[in-house]
Image: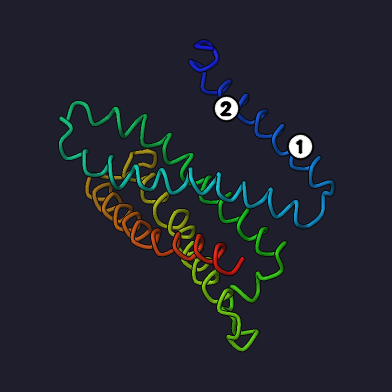
Amino acid sequence: MAGLLANLRNTVLVSCVLALIIIAGYFSHYGSADAIFFQAVFRFLHVLFGIMWIGLLYYFNFVQIPQMAQIPAELKPAVSKYIAPAALFWFRWAALFTWVAGVILAMNRGYLVEAFTLGATEGFANVGHIFIGMGMWLATVMFINVWAFIWPNQKIALGLVEADADAKAKAGRTAMLFSRTNTLLSIPMLVTMTMSQTLFG
């Protein structure tokens, strides 16, 4: 068992196999690969990728950024050359897959347009679509921030793109501000996502 757990790839593969067995169990019990079954699958994927995305967002904002000022200068390259690029890889792709899975889920459930228009197509009569739409827009802004502002500026700040010291400092601050913006938006976004599903189904 220790050999399995010592290797992350093998641990994740076994975890995925166990998840697939459980999904097969749900399918066997449910008995149909219909729209409802695929809603369950895409909700699982949406939550899985979302945990990775928001978990890393919180790691950056609650752990890495505050601690960087206390790390001795000679140790900072360990973070900027190894830890941060790896974390940003998983962060940006988790953001993309969370957003895509969420859009597919909303399409599958038949409320994508209603939610993205905040219920305007229904005369604002469906409060559930207004609330889930608010969450979808918050998540969309956060997703755009990751790919259009955080990642491009982090590439400069971390030295993955050639730039002088002033440009690196400016890019680092810009990336931090957009990351903090996403942290600010994340809690209201999670409120709308979780409470909408519970109260409006």
Q: How crowded is mark 2: few (under 14 residues within 10 Å), some or many (20 or more)?
A: few
Of 132 and 91, which appears nearest the observer?
132
Measuring from the top left, give residue 105's x and y in whole percent.
Answer: 66, 58
Q: Please, what secondary structure does the residue beneath circle 1 have?
A: helix
Q: Position of residue 176 (x, y in %)?
A: 30, 52
- Vertical order, 90 against 128 (above or below): above
Q: What residue type is labelled 1?
A: Ala
* Residue depicted at 30% across the width and 32% down the height: 79
**Residue corresponding to mark 1:** 24
Q: In this view, does 126 lie above or below 132?
A: below
Residue 134 position in % (x across, y down): 49, 71
Quadrant in the rendering for residue 14: top right
Q: Residue at x 36, y 36 (%)?
A: 84
Q: Which of 184 and 44 is in front in this view?
A: 44
Specify whether 183 is left or right of 65.
right
Mark 1 or 2: in front is 1
In the image, what residue occupies the spot 28% across and 49% down? 172
In this view, the residue farthest toward the bottom is: 123
Q: Classify residue 24 as left or right of residue 74.
A: right
In the rendered image, residue 15, in percent from the top left (x then y), is placed at: 60, 28
- Disc 1 vs disc 2: Cβ atoms closer than 8 Å? no
Q: Where residue 171 is drawn, which disc sits there?
A: none
Q: Which amino acid does label 2 sit on?
A: Val
| Residue annotated with mark 2 | 12
Is 88 situated left or right of 78 in this image? right
The answer to which of marks 1 and 2 sits earlier in the sequence is 2
- Rounded to the nearest angstrom, the CA distance separating label 1 from label 2 is 18 Å
Label 2 sits on a secondary structure element that is helix
Quadrant of the snapshot with the C terminus: bottom right
- Quadrant for residue 34, please give it: bottom right
Quadrant of the image containing the N terminus: top right
Q: Is residue 58 above or below residue 178?
A: above
